[in-house]
């Protein structure tokens, strides 16, 4: 049976599908699972089971009516018997409707919109983690299984990819990814720089700073000045190389961002900082512990399910309430 898996974006959301998909694919080797995603996100699917096939698209290729028609023509070649819609947006609905009309069984991710309102009303409700919701979709397709995924590198740690960085030895390697899509999910950079400064004074600790090319990389490069054991890899590595480096870390410090999920996929401990969102929204990294999620616990948290551009209080108090000492202590 050919099964279409739809999850086009964003990187962190696609990353969360991997534990479920790898587990199901291994449990049902007689089926073929075709993953429809972007070319960039497809690079996450390292060491995947042989019955997972990538169907990649570029975002610009599927824009508008004609783009959707071209995509549907491409999908028609595979004669899908079932669809697991892990995206559940307008474009995926169109695909669902067309394939359903052709006889395919379609199951969509339940986004629990009613429960979202309760979470934002601070009624002490927690959403089912998205990683498990993806498992629910496969169960409703008639493919129930246990979570067996552990890491993108299940056998051995990958070869360390970076040149110019000494072998780890007995050093304590800490990754820090201080950025996120929304400002309300970013710990104040001046405070995060103090975290870097405190950790850099430890003789046995090496810090690796993660971020995107451009402005983020430029900012992080400034943080390395005067600290020989602080290394910025922002913009200097491919996605695959970043995953390999993360697999060698002892701990990764992140926001509620894609880097939290990337580190989780390689079985690295993550200390995460939460602001406008909280773990109650369902986006906790795979396999991560609740005690490693830092939440100030203000009455207004969470104010968004996936993040928002502006704090309605105007001061991002939920982030400012956490001190650098709080963060350094939990990393220790």
Image (cartoon, rainbow, N blue to C red):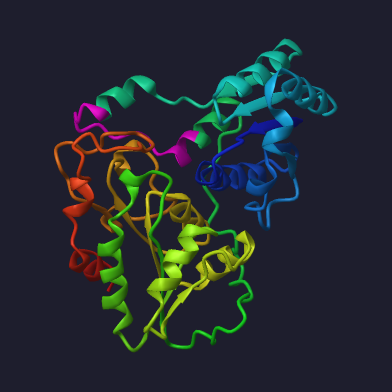
Q: Residue 328 location in percent, x, y?
A: 25, 70
Q: In terms of depth relative to the viewer, which is nearer, 227 or 206?
A: 227
**Image quarter in which the C terminus is found:** bottom left
Residue at image position (25%, 31%) is 125
Residue at image position (66%, 43%) is 25
Q: Is residue 38 above or below residue 235?
A: above
Residue at image position (40%, 39%) is 129
Q: In terms of depth relative to the viewer, which is nearer, 205 or 144?
A: 205
**Image quarter in which the N terminus is found:** top right
Q: Is residue 131 magenta?
A: yes
State whether residue 250 appears in this view: no
Q: Residue 19 location in percent, x, y?
A: 54, 48
Q: Is residue 249 magenta?
A: no
Q: Is residue 71 above or below residue 176?
A: above
Residue at image position (74%, 32%) is 61
State whether residue 199 appears in this view: yes
Question: Which residues, given as a range, are shown in magenta?
Answer: 120-133
In the image: residue 39, left or right of residue 115: right
- Chief secondary structure of the magenta span? loop
Q: Residue 70 location in percent, x, y?
A: 79, 24
């Amino acid at each position: 049976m050919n099964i279409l898996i739809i999850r086009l974006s964003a990187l962190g959301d696609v990353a969360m599908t991997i534990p479920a998909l790898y587990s199901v694919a291994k449990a049902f080797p007689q089926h073929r699972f075709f993953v429809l995603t972007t070319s960039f996100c497809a690079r996450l699917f390292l060491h995947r089971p042989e019955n997972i096939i990538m169907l990649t698209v570029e975002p610009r290729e599927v824009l508008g009516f004609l783009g959707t028609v071209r995509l549907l023509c491409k999908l028609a070649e595979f004669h899908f018997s079932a669809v697991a819609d892990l995206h559940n947006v307008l474009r995926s609905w169109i695909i669902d409707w067309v394939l359903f009309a052709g006889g395919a069984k379609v199951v969509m991710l339940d986004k629990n919109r009613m429960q979202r309102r309760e979470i934002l009303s601070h009624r002490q409700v927690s959403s089912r983690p998205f990683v498990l919701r993806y498992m629910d979709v496969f169960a409703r397709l008639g493919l129930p299984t246990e979570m067996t995924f552990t890491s993108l590198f299940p056998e051995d740690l990958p070869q360390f990819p970076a040149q110019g960085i000494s072998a780890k030895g007995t050093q304590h390697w800490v990754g820090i990814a201080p950025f996120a899509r929304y400002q309300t999910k970013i710990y104040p950079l001046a405070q995060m720089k103090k975290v870097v400064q405190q950790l850099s004074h430890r003789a046995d600790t090496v810090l690796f700073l993660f971020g995107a090319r451009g402005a983020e990389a430029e900012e992080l490069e400034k943080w390395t000045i005067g600290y020989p054991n602080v290394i910025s890899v922002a913009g200097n590595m491919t996605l695959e190389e970043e995953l390999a480096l993360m697999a060698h870390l002892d701990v990764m410090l992140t926001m509620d961002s894609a880097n939290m999920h990337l580190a989780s996929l390689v079985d690295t401990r993550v200390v995460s900082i939460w602001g406008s969102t909280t773990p109650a929204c369902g986006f906790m990294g795979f396999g991560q512990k609740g005690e490693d999620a830092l939440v100030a616990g203000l009455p207004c948290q969470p104010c968004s399910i996936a993040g928002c551009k502006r704090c309605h209080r105007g001061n991002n108090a939920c982030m400012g309430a956490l001190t650098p000492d709080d963060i350094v202590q939990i990393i220790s």
